[in-house]
């Protein structure tokens, strides 16, 4: 068996992993590259150490090699095929693969083309799903576009909203060639669809605003990101200029959290008359889940819940450190910790291994992977029914959806006092705030002493009678008002 030192082990398991994730398709390669056999192609993608720079073959329809290199020029220094780089570093470094560009199919003209930069069970895409479902109920038709495939494709199809996975990530715009290609292709998609309004759901969709302007289609440019300073795509001058051009071209610019307006206005020029604030609403959840009774741990342990993609920015490490301190102080057998959001990347594996050491102190532990199906997502909601407290440790967010979900189930929240997060927690009323990264303070708030469960139970009663978030219906009406201003 051949060894690939770059991947750190024999390469056959990596072929299997790439195949399962649909980034390597040997049959597709054999049909496209007739001059090469299977052994050569496997060796080419997973074991060769050098290339002449002109033979960048693609391993599947879901991985565009040249686009990956254009988006991440530093990968040119990596001494193997870019697919190897993506498999080893892509998840932990939040890099994207790129599907081949797809020509849109003919369709009935929708009222809205809703462009979502992803189709997975994360904050902004799920907010798009909620909005699309309520728009449909209001008689507004929605077509959904995204650069990348994902589990929400099925959910949108079930809703009756067609999806186009086109491969047009803004990250292709790092090069002049890629910049022109994505604008032209986005224009082709919109010509085919003929929507009344474009709804661009994040700064990653800025190129769609420019394509819509060329066709005379008005656009609503929605900013979900909390702060441009932490958006890695904006490290590129070309993409910064593209986003500024989108602010200039959009008919309406919507922010979903007030602190984000100040952060973005400090970095970009945005016409005041275009600005609108439509705060993230309470998420749309199945009634049977919301109506279900609480399911607390019968052992009287303090049940701590965290839900979110495990990553350095989300900083779940702080919560694990706080729990380790409590475990060492003898409180382990009084705690149950549920962490949802582990991926397949190295960072997730390292953090999971660290979390497992909590069992040495008697902590009851549940470590759950990211949801990849609707059924798995439903199971996550069950955890909210048993949680005493929800912990958000992220360094930056805009009114995070997971806190909104916790409030839907009347679960108190502990979160850092940072812009975009702290505004959602009424300290001492709906939860508690702590200093960002202050593990000692977080541990003190989670200390499962005799009174702690009672404290959270009292907060739960406060929440059951207070209106914390705008309703999804009110938010949907606000978007409808923005659309109608533009389409007349």
Image (cartoon, rainbow, N blue to C red):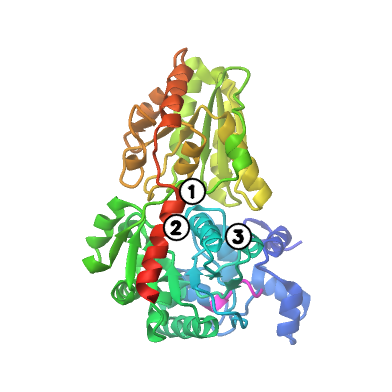
Disc 3 is placed on an element classified as: helix
In front: label 2 or label 3 = 2
Is 65 magenta? The answer is yes
Q: Is residue 324 above or below residue 201?
A: above
Front residue (pair 180, 144): 144
Q: Is mark 1 in CB contact (under 8 Å) with mark 2?
A: no
Residue under the point 62% across and 36% down: 382
Q: Where's residue 292, x and y in %?
A: 62, 33
Q: Which residues are magenta?
A: 60-66
Front residue (pair 260, 101): 260
Mark 3 highlights which residue? 152
Q: Where's residue 341, x and y in %?
A: 56, 45
Mark 1 highlights which residue? 311
Residue under the point 54% across and 65% down: 139
* Residue 314, picture quadrant: top left
Disc 2 is placed on an element classified as: helix
* Residue 244, picture quadrant: bottom left
Q: Is residue 484 above or below residue 151?
A: below
- Image quarter (top left, top right, bottom left or bottom right) of the C terminus: bottom left
Q: Is residue 442 above or below residue 488?
A: above
- Image quarter (top left, top right, bottom left or bottom right) of the N terminus: bottom right
Say the numbered circle drawn on residue 192: none
Say the numbered circle drawn on residue 476: 2
Question: What is the C-alpha distance between the residues marked 1 and 3?
Answer: 21 Å
Q: Tag count in the figure?
A: 3
């Amino acid at each position: 068996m051949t060894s690939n030192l770059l991947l750190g082990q024999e390469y056959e398991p990596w072929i299997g992993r790439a195949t399962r994730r649909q980034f390597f398709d040997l049959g597709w390669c054999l049909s496209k590259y007739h001059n090469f056999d299977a052994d050569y192609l496997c060796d080419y993608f997973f074991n060769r150490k050098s290339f002449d720079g002109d033979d960048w073959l693609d391993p599947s329809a879901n991985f565009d090699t040249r686009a990956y290199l254009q988006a991440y020029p530093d990968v040119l220094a990596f001494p193997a095929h870019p697919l190897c780089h993506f498999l080893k570093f892509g998840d932990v470094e939040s890099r994207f693969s790129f599907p081949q560009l797809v020509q849109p199919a003919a369709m009935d003209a929708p009222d809205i083309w809703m462009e979502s930069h992803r189709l997975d069970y994360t904050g902004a895409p799920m907010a798009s799903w909620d909005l699309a479902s309520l728009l449909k109920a209001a008689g507004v038709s929605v077509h959904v576009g995204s650069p990348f495939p994902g589990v929400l494709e099925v959910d949108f199809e079930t809703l009756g909203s067609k999806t186009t996975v086109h491969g047009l990530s803004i990250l292709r715009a790092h090069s002049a060639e890629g910049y022109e290609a994505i604008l032209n292709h986005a224009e082709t998609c919109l010509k085919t669809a003929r929507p009344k309004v474009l709804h661009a759901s994040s700064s990653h969709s800025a190129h769609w605003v420019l394509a819509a302007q060329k066709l005379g289609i008005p656009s609503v440019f929605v900013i979900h990101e909390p702060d441009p300073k932490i958006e890695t795509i904006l490290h590129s001058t070309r993409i910064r200029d593209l986003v500024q051009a989108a602010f200039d071209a959009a008919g309406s610019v919507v922010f979903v959290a007030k602190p984000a307006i100040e952060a973005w206005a400090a970095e970009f020029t945005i016409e005041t008359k275009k600005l609108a604030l439509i705060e993230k609403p309470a998420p749309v959840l199945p009634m049977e889940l919301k109506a279900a009774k609480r399911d607390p741990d019968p052992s009287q342990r303090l049940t701590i819940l965290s839900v979110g993609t495990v990553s350095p920015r989300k900083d779940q490490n702080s919560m694990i450190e706080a729990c380790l301190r409590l475990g060492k102080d003898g409180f382990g057998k009084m705690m149950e910790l549920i962490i949802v959001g582990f991926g397949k990347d190295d960072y997730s594996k390292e953090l999971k291994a660290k979390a497992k050491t909590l069992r040495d102190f008697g902590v009851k532990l549940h470590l759950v992977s990211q949801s990849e199906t609707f059924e798995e997502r439903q199971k996550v909601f069950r955890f909210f029914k048993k949680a005493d407290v929800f912990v958000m440790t992220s360094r930056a967010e805009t009114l995070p959806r997971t806190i909104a979900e916790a409030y839907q189930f009347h679960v108190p929240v502990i979160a850092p006092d940072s812009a975009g997060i702290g505004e959602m927690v009424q300290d001492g009323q709906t939860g508690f705030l702590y200093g960002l990264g202050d593990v000692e303070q977080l541990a003190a708030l989670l200390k499962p002493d005799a009174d702690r469960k009672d404290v959270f139970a009292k907060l739960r009663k406060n929440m059951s009678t207070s209106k914390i978030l705008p309703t999804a219906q009110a938010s949907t009406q606000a978007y409808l008002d923005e659309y109608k201003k533009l389409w007349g």
